[in-house]
Amino acid sequence: MDTILLTGIQSYGYTGALAEENILGQWFEADLTLWLDLTAATQSDHLSDTHDYRYIIQETQRLIREERFKLIERLAGAIATQALQSDRRLSQVKVKLTKLSPPIENFSGQISIEIIRHQTDS
């Protein structure tokens, strides 16, 4: 199976369990891996034979910006569901979602989660 990798999709959002995350917000970054058969596209050079990933990028940014969940796991799940529903040719999707600067005292790192969902899950 072939993959399309979408990396570094950033948006400012308000998902988080802490009150300041819901009020002040923070930057998130999403990386998506889309599994699908790209054989036809490698032979035809037609956009219709592949997945037009611009829609997933825009929808990922919109979900981060507009949805307000307590858990990044829930936001990652919403991103995965949206991706799978956008094109039935996608057999599975992996979403890595990162809080770039989580508001945790004495912690300067990032927090990421990864989920994998299959077309049969959506």
Image: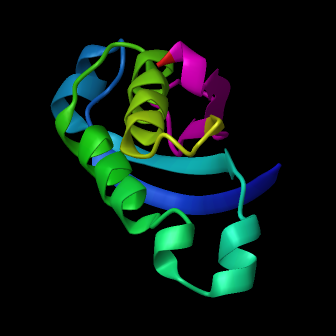
**Residue at point 56%, 62% (across, down):** 8
Q: Is residue 80 left or right of residue 38?
A: left
Q: Is residue 17 left or right of residue 103?
A: left
Q: Is residue 8 left or right of residue 122?
A: right
Of residue 63 and residue 85, the one placed in the foreground of this image is 85
Which image quarter: residue 42?
bottom right
Of residue 32 and residue 24, the one placed in the foreground of this image is 32
Residue 115 magenta-highlighted: yes
**Residue at point 52%, 24% (across, down):** 104
Which image quarter: residue 96?
top right
| Residue 47, horizontal then vertical, whole percent | 49, 78
Residue 86 magenta-highlighted: no
**Residue at point 16%, 29% (across, down):** 23
Asked if residue 23 is positioned above or below residue 32 in the image, the reply reads: above
| Residue 55, horizontal then vertical, whole percent | 34, 60
Q: How is the image coloured?
A: rainbow
Q: Is residue 95 left or right of residue 103?
A: right
**Residue at point 57%, 17% (across, down):** 120
Outermost right residue: 1
Asked if residue 21 is positioned above or below residue 38 in the image, the reply reads: above
Asked if residue 61 is positioned above or below residue 54 in the image, the reply reads: above
| Residue 75, horizontal then vertical, whole percent | 40, 26
Outermost bottom residue: 45
| Residue 31, horizontal then vertical, whole percent | 60, 50
In this picture, which residue range is highlighted in magenta? 96-121
Asked if residue 50 is positioned above or below residue 88 in the image, the reply reads: below
| Count of marks, rendered view | 0
